[in-house]
Image (cartoon, grey):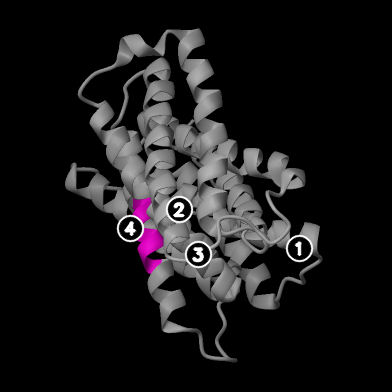
Amino acid sequence: MTAFFALLTSLVWGLADFGGGLLTRRTPALTVVVVSQGIAAVVLGAIVLATGGWSEAGPRLWFAFAAGLVGPVALLCFYQALALGPMGVVSPLATLSVAVPVGVGLVLGERPGLVQALGSAVAVTGVVLAGGPQLRGTAVQRRTIWMTLVAAVGFGTVFALIAEASTTVTGLFLALFVQRVTDVVVGGAALVVSVQRGGAALPEGGFPWDALPALAFVGLADVAANGTYAMATRSGPVTVAAVLASLYPVVTALAARGFLNERLRGIQTAGAGLALLGTLLLATG
């Protein structure tokens, strides 16, 4: 079940990142974050009310609150990095997020076996190659690199925090709701500051109502990825769940191939194969 939930995380998160990257080409990144997470917060609020999740309130919700503080920063940096730099650089670097939850797992005493350690190394290598690292070509802006690294640390921190935020399914819904409300408040405040400093809150044509379904998908998919990751960490080692969940760049690359007709280079195809091999080693180890 650990492998199933972690792979589901990578699938959903990869599609969400693909959608978010497309949306930021038309709409300011902060607006994408606030609207998408706001929609997710409304849906989660309804689920919490329907399931009686308020009864699960307790000290663990501070982990969800902290995740909500970190999440908007990570998303904003990631979306802006995608807008500024080539995906072949941004996507592989973002996989460094796996270091945070893996490090937490090791500190908590987890020790993966030889096969799992080998699988982790193979999978992470495959993910980096599947992202299509640019070994030649125009230099990437230093700002893009730094923003991607901040996003990676932020994503890894959110994963580690949300895994500690609840012990039950209904509690998980409440934790995700608290996280999203915090996301919206923090992101909204940042958006107001940006507008006061002359930044744009909307594209030139006004609010992109035609993009509302896509914004909803991005927000809800991000929530679903956090939820399935939390389920993965409960059913098995964090070190395994984190590596498998980090396969999302493969999904993003395949989505770009399918929806944008972007050709996969040989190095990306080889990387996808290595990622699959690493996944099999982790699942069987």
272 vs 186, nearest the viewer: 186
Residue at 57 percent of width and 63 percent of height:
274
Label 2 CA crowd tier, 10 Å (few <14, some 14–19, many 20+): many
Alpha-carbon distance for marks 3 and 4?
Answer: 34 Å
5 vs 278, nearest the viewer: 5
225 vs 27, nearest the viewer: 27
**Marks 1 and 2, the one that precedes in the sequence:** 2
Q: Amino acid at mark 4?
A: Ala
Q: Amino acid at mark 2?
A: Leu
Secondary structure under badge 3? loop
Location of mark 1 (residue): 257
Rendering coords of residue 114 (x, y %): 34, 54
Q: Amino acid at mark 1?
A: Arg
Secondary structure under badge 4? helix
Location of mark 2 (residue): 191
Using the rendered view, name the quadrant where residue 254 is placed: bottom right
Pointer 1 and pointer 2: residues touching (CB < 8 Å)? no
**Marks 2 and 4, the one that precedes in the sequence:** 4
In the rendered view, tell whether residue 58 sits above or below residue 38.
above
Q: Amino acid at mark 3?
A: Gly
Q: Nearer the viewer, mark 3 or mark 4?
A: 3
